[in-house]
Amino acid sequence: MADREDRHCRLLSEEFPDYRLMLASLPEATTRVTVSKDLFLRALEEHPEDRITLRVTHHGLNVLATEAAAPVSRRRPP
């Protein structure tokens, strides 16, 4: 955050998997969310658990109980 100097990040003890194969096998995205990097990082930092839930609504992105206003655009699949 701009007003803070500390940054915390969870570390994995295992080797990070090759994400390219996983991304290549996913269907084309039908929903995109543009969110402020600072707001998203703050929401992640405030969540103490190992996993998070991202919920996209017509009003923005919800990271559990933390909401960040964000434009949402949806494309109907062909």
Image (cartoon, grey):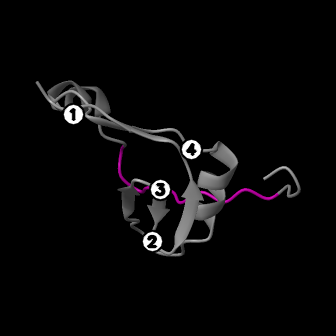
Mark 1 residue crowding within 10 angstroms, few (<14) / some (14–19) / many (20+): few
Alpha-carbon distance for marks 2 and 3?
14 Å
Residue 38 location, x and y as percent? Answer: 69, 49
Task: Report the amino acid beneath label 3.
Answer: His
Mark 2 residue crowding within 10 angstroms, few (<14) / some (14–19) / many (20+): few
Residue bearing the label numbered 2: 64
* Label 2 secondary element: loop
Q: Closer to the N terminus: mark 4 or mark 2?
A: 4
Residue bearing the label numbered 3: 59
Residue bearing the label numbered 4: 35
Q: Is residue 5 magenta?
A: no
Quarter holding the C terminus is top left
- From which residue to which does the magenta span run? 6-15
Task: Report the amino acid beneath label 4.
Answer: Val
The residue positioned 45% from the left and 71% from the top of the image is 64
The residue positioned 58% from the left and 58% from the top of the image is 68
Q: Closer to the N terminus: mark 3 or mark 4?
A: 4
Alpha-carbon distance for marks 1 and 2?
25 Å
Q: Closer to the N terminus: mark 4 or mark 1?
A: 1
Q: Closer to the N terminus: mark 1 or mark 2?
A: 1
Residue bearing the label numbered 1: 22
Q: Closer to the N terminus: mark 2 or mark 3?
A: 3
Task: Report the amino acid beneath label 1.
Answer: Met
Looking at the image, residue 6 sits to the left or right of residue 45; the answer is: right
Name which quarter of the figure residue 76 lies in.
top left
Alpha-carbon distance for marks 1 and 3?
29 Å
Chief SS of the magenta region: loop
